[in-house]
Amino acid sequence: MRLSKIKLAGFKSFVDPTIIPFPSNLVGVVGPNGCGKSNVIDAVRWVMGESSASRLRGDSITDVIFNGSGSRKPVGSSSVELLFDNSDSTLEGQYAKYTEIGIRREVSRDGISSYFLNGTRCRRKDITGVFLGTGLGPRSYSIIEQGMISRLIEAKPEEMRVFLEEAAGISKYKERRRETSNRIKHTKENLDRLKDVLDEVEKQIKHLDRQAKTAERYGRLKDSERRTSAELLALRLRDLDAGAAEAGSLLSERETALQSIVAEQRKTEAEIERMRLVQTERSDECSVVQGRFYKAGSEIARLEQAIEHAHELRARQQKDLEQAIEGAKEIASHINKDQSEIEQLELSLNELVPDLERARESERQSLASLESAEKALADWQERWNTWSSQANDSQQIRNVEQTRTEQLESRLKSLNERRKKLEESRLAESPDELKQKFDKLAEQELRKRQARDEFERALTDISDKIRKLREQDQKLTRLVDERHASLQAAESRYASLEAVQKAAIGESNETVQGWLQSAGLADNARVVKLLDVDDGWDRAVETVLGQYLQAVCVNDVQEVAASLSRLRSGNITLLQKDAVVRAAQPGTLAEKVRNAPASIDSMLRSVRIADTLDAALALRPTLADDQSVITSEGLWLSGSWLRVSRDTDPKSGILGREHEMRRLKNDIRELQARFDSARKLVQDGRSRLNQLEERRETLQQ
C-alpha cells in the first residue's frame, strides 16, 4: 500500500483546493522557508488521527483552519484526504477488494472533527485500526521528523518494544487483545453491578412481602368497617323516618300560613305597579333635565381644555424662550472662545510667517533643481535612445558585412580550387571543351550573383522591419509602463476609499460582522450600495437619511429578530427591502434617488427640494406638519427647525465616497482592459521581432 495523492482544502497555508501527487516511491518536497513543507507532514498526521494541537504546531485543533491574510478572508472549515494505492491488496479483510483507499478528515470552526473512509463516515478508531501493523500512524516511526532518530536511539526498553511490535506487525493484535481485555473487564464490572442489583431486588421483594401481608390485614379490617358503617346507616335511616313524619305535620301548618302571606303579597304588587307608573313619568322629566346638564358639562369641558391648551402653549413658548436665551449665551461664550483662539492663531501665524517664507524659498530651489534634473534625465534618455539606435544599425551593418566577407572568402577559395582544377584539366582537354565549360561556369556564376542580390535585398528588408519593430517595442513598453502606473494608482485609491467606507458604514466592526455571518446576512447589501443619486444631491440625501445609509437590507425583519440575542455589543440597523412600485413624486427628494427600498422612498417623499435657501424659506409656510424642505447644499428646514450640514471635504460623505468608488471601479476596469491590450501588443510585437531575427540569422547562415 503506497500513498499516491494528498488533497488539501483550507488546511493552514493551503487555502485553495490543492492536490499533491506522489507518482513514485521516492518523492521530495523542497522549497524556501515558510513555503508550507511542514504543513504537508502536519496534514498527513492530522488526517491519520492526531489529536494533540501542540504536535501540529498550534494552540488548538481549529488552528489548522486557514485564518485569513491581508488579501484573503478566513475559511470556515478544513479538510485533508489521503489516497492510498491498494492494488497489491496490502490491507486485508473488508478493504482488500478496493484498489484505492481514501481517508478524509474534516473540521469546522466549532472544533468538531469528522472522519470518512472511502466516502463513508466512520470513527477515529476505525482510521487508526486501518493503519495498525503497517507502520503508519500519527506518531509512528514511519514519519521521521527532527529529533526522531535521537528518540529512537535513546528510547527506553518499553518505548523500543512499541516500535519493534509496530514494525513486526503485531501491534494490531495487541490492540485487539487490549480491547478484548477491556470488554472482559467491563463485563465483569457489569456482572458485579448486576449482583448488587439482584441483592437490592431481593431486599425489595422481602419488603414487598411485608407490605402485602399488611395489605391483606387492611382488607379484612376494611370489610369490618363497611359492615359497621352499614349498620350505623340503618339506625340513622330509622331515626330520619320518624323525623320526616313530624316534619310533614309541621309542613301542613306552614302551608296554611303561606297562603295568607301570598294574599298579602298580591296586594303589595298592585301598589308597586301603581308606583312604577309614577316613577316612569318622573324618569322622563329627569332625562330632559339630565340632557341639559350634560350639554352644559361638555361646554365647560371644552372651555377648560382650551384654557389648558393655552397654558401648555404658553409654558412651551416660555421654555423655548429660556432655551433660546441659554443658546444665545452659549453661542456668545463660543464666540468669545473662538475670538481668543483666533488671536492665539494670529500670533502663531505671525511667528511662523518667516519660517514659511524660508520653506517656500527652499521649495522653489528644490523645484528648480528637480526641473534641471528631469531635463538632464530627458536629454540622457534621448541620447541613450539615439546611441541604441546607432548601435543596432552598426550591429546590423557589421553582421551584413561579416556575412559578405565570409561569402567572398568562400567564393575566393572555391575559385582558387576551380582555377587549379582548370589548369590541371587545360593540359588534358581541347580548347573547345574548355570554352564550353567556361560558358557553363559563367552562366552558373551569373545565377549565383542574382541569387545573392535577392538574399541581400531580403536581408535589408528584414533589417528594416526589425528596426521598426524595435522602435515600436520601445514606444509600446513606455505605454505599458504608463498604463500600469495609472492602474496601480487607481487601485491604490480604490483600496484606501474602500477601507474608509467600510469603517464609515460599520463593516469593520468584528462583533457586528460576526453576528451578520452567523445570521446568514454577511452578503446582504447595505442601503448605500443600492442608492443611485443624481449628481449634486449626495449631501442632501445623506443629511436626511443619516444612519439609515448603514442599514443592512433583509427580506423580513421579523425572521432576523429571533437571532438578535446573539449580538452582545455594537450597533446595527436592519431594513426590510420591499420593492418600490410607485412613481417618483415630482418636487420631492425621492425624485433624485433611484433603487431605494420602500421605507427609504417613503422618508424621501416627505422632503421637498429647493435650489437655494431663499426658495426653501419661501416654501416653508406651505409645508405640512410631516413635511420639510432641503437644498442641494444640505440646508434642511421645516416649520419649526433648521439643520445645516457642512463638511470641509465635499467627498467626505458616505454617498460621495460610494459614487467615487463606483467611478474608480469603472476606471479600473477600463484601465485594466487598456493595460492588457497594450501588453498583448508588446508580446505580439516581440514575438514577431524574434521570428524576424531568427529568419535573418537563417538567411545570413
Image: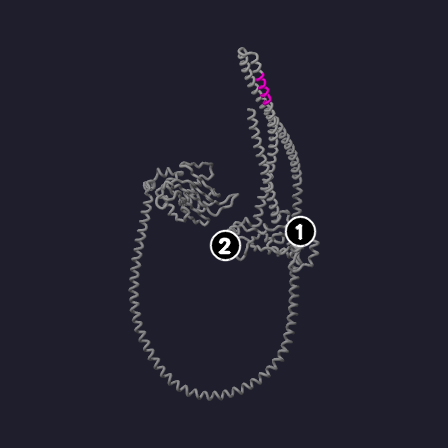
Residue at image point 64% right, 54% down? 590
Residue 321: quadrant of the picture = bottom right
**In the rendered image, is residue 391 in sight?**
no
Q: In the picture shown, does residue 417 fall above or below 344?
A: above
Residue that protrudes farthest toward the front in the picture? 432
Quarter of the N terminus within the rendering: top left
* Residue type pointed to by label 2: Arg
Within the magenta stretch, is there residue 431? no
Whether 445 is among the magenta residues is: yes
The percent coordinates of residue 112 (x first, y second) are 43, 49
Give the Cα distance between marks 2 and 1.
Answer: 41 Å
Instruction: Give the secondary structure at mark 1.
Output: loop
Q: State the residue in front, 163 or 336.
A: 163
Q: State the SS at label 2.
A: helix
Give the left or right position of residue 76, taking residue 236 as reference.
right
For label 2, the crowd category at 10 Å Cα-Cα, with few meaning under 14, some 14 to 19 and many 20 or more, is: few
> Would you say residue 371 is visible in this rendering?
yes
Q: Is residue 562 left or right of residue 139?
A: right
State the image coordinates of residue 308 (x, y, percent, origin top left).
Answer: 64, 67
Which of these two is toward me, 54 or 513? 513
Magenta stretch?
439-452
User: Alpha-carbon neighbours of circle 1 within 10 Å: few (<14), some, or many (≥20)?
Assistant: some
Q: Amino acid at mark 1?
A: Ser
**Magenta stretch prevailing secondary structure:** helix
Image disc number at residue 566: 2
Instruction: Give the vertical position of 630 relative to 484 (above or below).
Output: below
Label ID, residue 632: 1
Tell me, what colour scheme is on the image? one colour
Quadrant assignment for the C terminus: top right
